[in-house]
């Protein structure tokens, strides 16, 4: 067994079996906290009090394990180790763990981190847990002699994790007064209480503001304090350096030098500042929740969209194909399949290739041609409630212009000029790579169109913002960004490229953070223009959930086009609309403009 210089076992990577998953019924709201028990039959070791494990289901949809503190552990009769965790449902990783079942296989890296220092014999200690932070300190308390400690537990509502404690005195506070003392922790634990308790040390885990308060009163009372901290981490063994915490001794790793720190070395002023402000942008002040439903609509050059969610070109056909699948009429808009003047059969060979968190495609603008669209598909699109958008592409300047002339005479209310398709050998993205080419085609199309014109750009351009500004100057009423990124896939068994054109477009969740950056930077550039020259930006790129939608809007987007996500989950756009509405109502945003561009400096 590998141990550190203090004799604490070093982490090992093992596989365990989930023996039980149960809702902690005392936690409020219900289904917010779960108890997970894992049995490790081979290679497991019992953790020290205060340590944690990186948990990752074997059949998992998340990349990284999640650091979860140990609540309890024991060695079974057959020598296997059973470890109990309390898990607060917060994000995708914890949801996945809490939705697991008995018998599921789970990978564990641990035990990780240091431990709570053992108190001197005969000394009285104070133990404090806040919310889910009760788990590690309750586990620690169970290793101490009965009645050698007082235990304070603070919750917003209800209480949990306190079974089996043998405290000399147990005090519970709840913000809503549902259990014990009505109020936050200071309603029960103060400097005077610490002094009168004659405590040798205080041990705590919980929310950062609570720990900062404990550091302060311990300093005033002259009581040593040991505080268990948490931070985002990737490895759990000290190599990723993602979990550092600011201290008087420099930046220390939460997973290695911690999670238990001498409270007096922690710099909570720095921690608070970083949590309230990043990149020079301050956190938004809270608003009261709305009583009424928020307004998700927006107007674009006199065309009203009932919400900002649009079926993206190339992924939603003409809208009618999904009518039997979900209520298409709830969408804000539908951007048609990419349309060229002449019918196209598209590319031959492999057209789709799945990648981790993404999808590659090389369709090649297969479409019936603009005349056929105007006569056949457009009338059906116009019967739907969402705004119909014709996505205009071409292989030459002349075909773009002739297509624009035909669409101008049609009933379609909005045109999206596609100078970004990565999967055609002529036209497409070639026009969107430089300011001069983009400006030329936009100006030529604008001359033929009186309808609102969106220009769809490629992220491949090395002068993307400059291209966008040239398009605005040439007459674009909006910019949509970004079309697929280019990538290459190789069939390693055959030793050949997957796609006939070698390169193909990459979309899906994998590209989202890059797309958010591009949207942010473009909006930032547009905001330097006089107000009357500014145009909206329609975001595209890996949008799959309402949270993704909020990110893009806060980055500055006015509308959202959803593509690959619909293939994975046909209800994705409806869930985005509902989730966006619920978020705005909860956060007090009456309309989209109140949260649009919040992170713009």
Image (cartoon, rainbow, N blue to C red):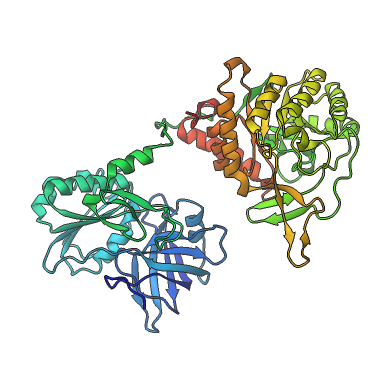
Q: Is residue 307 visible?
A: no
Residue at point 31%, 57% (across, down): 134
* Quarter-of-image position of residue 314: top right
Tally the numbered discs. Answer: 0
In-image side of 66 versus 148 (left or right): right
Residue at point 37%, 52% (across, down): 244
The percent position of residue 254, horizontal first and vertical second, equals 35, 56
Residue at point 73%, 59% (across, down): 490
* Quarter-of-image position of residue 489: bottom right
Q: Is residue 201 above or below residue 410?
A: below
The percent position of residue 418, horizontal first and vertical second, equals 76, 33
Q: Is residue 213 above or below residue 464?
A: below
In-image side of 5 versus 534 (left or right): left
Position of the N terminus, as image quadrant, is bottom left
The percent position of residue 484, horizontal first and vertical second, equals 70, 43
Q: Is residue 480 visible?
A: yes
The percent position of residue 162, horizontal first and vertical second, equals 29, 60
**Is residue 145 or residue 61 the one in the foreground?**
61
Q: Is residue 263 above or below residue 426?
A: below
In-image side of 480 versus 229 (left or right): right
* Quarter-of-image position of residue 457: top right
In-image side of 167 versus 580 (left or right): left
**Is residue 410 or residue 176 the one in the foreground?**
410
């Amino acid at each position: 067994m590998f141990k550190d210089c203090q004799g604490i076992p070093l982490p090992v990577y093992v596989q365990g079996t989930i023996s039980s998953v149960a809702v902690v019924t005392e936690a409020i709201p219900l289904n917010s906290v779960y108890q997970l028990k894992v049995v490790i039959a081979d290679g497991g070791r019992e953790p020290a009090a205060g340590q944690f494990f990186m948990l990752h289901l074997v059949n998992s949809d998340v990349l990284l394990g999640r650091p979860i503190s140990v609540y309890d552990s024991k060695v079974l009769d057959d020598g296997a180790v059973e470890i109990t965790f309390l898990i607060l449902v917060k994000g995708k990783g914890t949801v996945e763990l809490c939705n697991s079942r008995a018998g599921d296989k789970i990978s564990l890296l641990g035990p990780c981190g240091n431990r709570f220092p053992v108190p001197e014999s005969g000394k009285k200690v104070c133990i404090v847990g806040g919310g889910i932070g009760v788990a590690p300190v309750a586990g620690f308390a169970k290793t101490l002699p009965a009645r050698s400690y007082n235990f304070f537990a603070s919750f917003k509502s209800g209480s949990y994790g306190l079974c089996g404690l043998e405290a000399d005195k147990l005090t519970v506070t709840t913000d809503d007064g549902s259990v014990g003392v009505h109020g936050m922790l200071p309603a029960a634990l103060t400097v005077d209480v610490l002094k009168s308790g004659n405590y040798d040390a205080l041990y705590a885990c919980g929310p950062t503001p609570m720990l900062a308060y404990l550091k302060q009163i311990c300093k005033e009372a002259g009581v040593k304090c040991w505080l268990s901290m948490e931070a985002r981490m990737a490895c759990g063994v000290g190599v990723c350096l993602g979990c550092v915490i600011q201290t008087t001794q420099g930046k220390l790793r939460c997973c290695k030098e911690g999670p238990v720190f001498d409270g007096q070395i922690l710099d909570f002023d720095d921690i608070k500042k970083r949590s309230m402000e990043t990149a020079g942008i301050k956190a938004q002040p809270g608003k009261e929740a709305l009583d009424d439903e928020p307004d998700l609509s927006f107007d674009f050059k006199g065309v009203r969209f009932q919400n900002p969610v649009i079926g993206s070109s190339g992924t939603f056909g003409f809208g009618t194909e999904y009518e039997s699948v979900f209520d298409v009429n709830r969408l804000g808009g539908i951007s048609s399949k990419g349309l060229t003047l002449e019918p196209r059969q598209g590319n031959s060979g492999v057209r789709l290739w799945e990648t981790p968190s993404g999808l590659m495609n090389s369709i090649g603008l297969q479409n019936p041609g603009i005349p056929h669209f105007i006569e056949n598909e457009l009338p059906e699109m116009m019967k739907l409630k969402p705004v119909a958008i014709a996505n205009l592409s071409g292989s030459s300047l002349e075909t773009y212009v002739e297509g624009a002339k035909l669409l101008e005479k049609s009933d379609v209310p909005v045109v999206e000029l596609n100078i970004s398709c990565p999967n055609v050998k002529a036209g497409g993205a070639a026009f969107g790579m430089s300011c001069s080419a983009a400006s030329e085609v936009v100006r030529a199309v604008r001359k033929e169109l009186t309808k609102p014109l969106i220009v769809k750009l490629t992220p491949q351009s090395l002068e993307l913002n400059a291209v966008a500004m040239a398009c605005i100057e040439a007459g674009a009423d909006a910019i949509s960004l970004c079309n697929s990124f280019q990538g290459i896939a190789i069939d390693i068994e055959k030793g050949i490229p997957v796609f006939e054109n070698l390169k193909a477009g990459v979309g899906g969740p994998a590209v989202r953070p890059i797309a958010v950056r591009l949207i942010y930077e473009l909006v930032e550039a547009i905001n330097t223009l006089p107000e009357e020259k500014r145009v909206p930006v329609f975001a595209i790129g890996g949008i799959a959930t309402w949270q993704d939608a909020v990110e893009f809007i806060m980055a500055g987007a006015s509308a959202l086009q959803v593509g690959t996500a619909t293939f994975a989950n046909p209800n994705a756009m409806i869930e985005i609309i509902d989730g966006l509405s619920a978020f705005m109502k909860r956060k007090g945003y009456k309309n989209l403009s109140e949260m649009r561009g919040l992170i713009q400096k």
